[in-house]
Image (cartoon, rainbow, N blue to C red):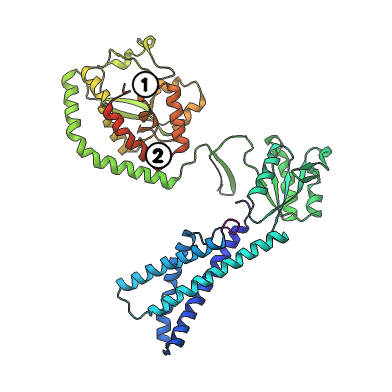
Amino acid sequence: MFDEKTIQIRRLMTVIDLMVTILAYGVAFWLQALLFQQDADNKDLFSHLALLPLIWAFLLYTLPKFGAYRSPRVATTFDYAWAVTRSVSVAIVVLLTLLFLLKIHYISRIVIAGFACIDIVFLFMVRLGTKYYFRRSLAHGENYLKVLIIGTGHRALTLSKSLLQRSEWGIDIIGHLDPDPKMKGQTINNAKVLGAIDDISQVLKDNVIDEVIMAVPRKMISDAEGIAYACQEEGVKLRLMADVYDLQVARVSLVELGNIPLLTLEPVALDPSKLMIKRLIDLVFSILITPVLLPLLAVTALAIKFDSPGPVFFIQERVGLKKRSFRMYKFRSMYSGSEEKIKELEAMNEAEGPIFKITNDPRITRVGKFIRKTSLDEFPQFINVLKGEMSLVGPRPMSLRDVDLFDRGIQRKRFSVKPGLTCLWQISGRSNLPFTKWLELDLEYIEKWSLRLDFKILLKTVPEVLKGSGAM
């Protein structure tokens, strides 16, 4: 939604809804007194009016929830009627439930029922009026947003098409300005080129223009200062297209640092609230499963200790979120000192890319083969999950040696999210996958991440681990 008219209308509808709700409540109280010939004293009136803030609080939640503020462009008359009916009905049911539980008997149920019927009618009439106003505005062009576009190239054409398609209350593209004066008089998507950029002051003076949008390459951003001054003089809003670097970004936002505006281009858009839920799930799951696994972990530790000399745990520096290194824990599955022998075995590496893999690795112990096949060697990483260095689901953390061998910048995009115990690669072939496919799945996870995807991966990981296929 580009224009701000919809936001303004929604705010106005909210205020009007408040007013008609108060009116509906008053009418319901008056009709009850009139029809049932009851004398309504001030005490009775005020006791009923005390419920109004509570009723409005309920409606403030249910009306947007059920679509009562949807744009009149997409919402039909039936949509509005159904949304209002559901909203008021739910609010009244909740209200009556509270009155029953709190044993409040002095509130007339007749007033509440009458109010519900009247309020549904009033709220629906507000939306009919909004829809009529919307159609009338489009027919007469009263609320069309009048826009001047700076530029005539690909960006300007794309912007022009998008504005015409997405504007809810109508767009009138007054014309274009271009650095080349020879472009004057030409037509860009049915809008004329009114002149060169130097003519902006005169164009703003001679035409009714609400907004100016710069849609030019970054090499021309230096011209923005003159355009900004001209817009400031005429009191016209100025916008700049943020895709000045032709980058595919997930989210663009503007924040202020003191008086300094900062345009932020985020390659990965992750919802902070969902990330908080993800972290909560990591903590709860790890805390609950650790006591269950303790006997198994103890047996595994003893088996490692008796099988070969050396420590029970293998601790290695891995690269995590934002390329921060951390110490990752695993059960030792190789003979002590095996890391130092990796250079001697580089010629035997069977894996493509930066990862290292040998089918019959001579460094792996007897117990090591078993715990790798069953993924028992990975269980100590729940410690990393509890510490916040890893998550249950995410790209596998890679060693410093592997990261140093990355040959493409895009491979480092996997560091934009927290590494995990399992990911798409785990349910798609595990270590049998070539590195290119491994990376492709990691990037796919980053692009499509959701809590639902995490649950799906966790559920599919269990049978894969039990089968033991593809484990190194």
Quadrant position of residue 162: top right
The stretch in magenta equals 71-75
Q: Is residue 322 visible?
A: no
Residue 147 lies in the magenta-colored region: no
Which residue was labeled with disc 1? 432
Say which of 26 and 290 sits in front.
26
Determine the secondary structure under disc 2: helix
340 and 367: which one is in front? Answer: 367
Queried whether the magenta region covers residue 74, the answer comes back as yes
**Image vertical order of residue 256 relative to residue 461, above or below:** below
Secondary structure, mark 1, is helix
Q: Residue 132: horizontal and vertical position, in percent?
A: 64, 65
Above or below for 71 versus 409: below
Residue 445 on image: x %, y %: 44, 34
Determine whether, in the image, residue 98 is placed left or right of residue 5.
left
Q: Which residue is mark 2?
A: 453
